[in-house]
Image (cartoon, rainbow, N blue to C red):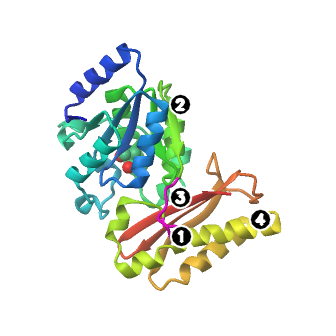
Amino acid sequence: VLELSDPRQLYDVCEAERRRGRRVGLVPTMGYLHEGHLSLVRRAHELADYVVLTIFVNPTQFGPGEDLDRYPNDPEGDLAKCLAEGVDCVFSPPPEAVYPDGYQTYVQVEELTRPLCGARRPGHFRGVATVVTKLFNMVGPCVAVFGEKDYQQLQVIRRMAEDLNMPVEVAGSPIVREPDGLAMSSRNAYLSESHRGQATCLRRGLIAVRDRAAEKGGISPEEAVKLCRSVIEAQPDARIDYVEVRDARSLAEIQRVAGDGGAVMALAVFFDKTRLIDNMVL
Ligand code: PAF
């Protein structure tokens, strides 16, 4: 696996691959790789010939008081996993290579970034859209793969790529879960044993709604939210940030969850300072 940290070198390597007629695939990550990330790599191998995985804990998508300073990292472990998965190139730039002195350009997606995580993490999606744009420009991927766990992020990036005529296919990849249903996340590493046990409530809340909607042939958003909240609130240490049901594409508010794939239930829950997210298309 080729290890690079200089954006210019990365571009040249990817350009050489394209000139050989190879499709370049991008998997952007913030490192501390787990099975979820590796599933993105496998998807990228299906969609591209040359797979670049980037590791960059992007400071512009973290708000004040968030976990930028303590974000977990394991460069050696990450590299070993990339090697095992046949990643062709691992790019991990230092912050100053991405945001040099004098940096002042940002990408803002409007409506889609207002609700859900966008409402609770001001500036988060501006940071995400900006760094993903920069990674697209550094790599020039034919396809880029993002996890569906970050559901809003995936919609934002799809919209951005379309709106800005970016010549890249944005592919989503299903959530990978622990055996007990907890969605895989680097942030799971922060959880105490007790909180790790309680954290299955996110998935259980979503399943309760799915089952109720199937049983009744549809459900109101209010009932869905109430039911999901009750499952989560049964855990002593779960602190709900939000639980919402929205249109699966526009993320606008909706009147009814019909069970036809048109709605998404998304939620964020704190255990202490650790914020977990999950979602389900209903
Ligand atoms: O999903 C992530 O890990 C990050 O938001 C991303 C897409 C790598 C941008 O920093």
What whole-number distance in Å separates the C-alpha atoms at marks 1 and 2? 33 Å
Which residue is the site of mark 4?
A: 214
> From mark 4 to mark 2, how far is it between C-alphas?
36 Å
Identify whether 266 is placed above or below 55. below
Range drawn in magenta: 175-182
Q: Looking at the picture, how far across and down is residue 160, in whole percent?
A: 49, 35
Rounded to the nearest angstrom, the CA distance separating label 3 from label 1 is 15 Å
Q: Which structural element holds mark 4?
A: helix
- State left or right for residue 102 relative to residue 143: left
Q: Quadrant of residue 21?
A: top left
The residue at 47%/28% (across/down) is: 168
N-term mark: 1 or 4: 1
Disc 1 from disc 4: Cα separation? 19 Å
- Crowding near pointer 3: few (<14 within 10 Å), some, many (20+)? many
Q: Which mark is residue 116?
A: 3
Helix, strand or loop under label 1: helix
4 or 3: mark nearer the eye: 4
Q: Is residue 176 magenta?
A: yes
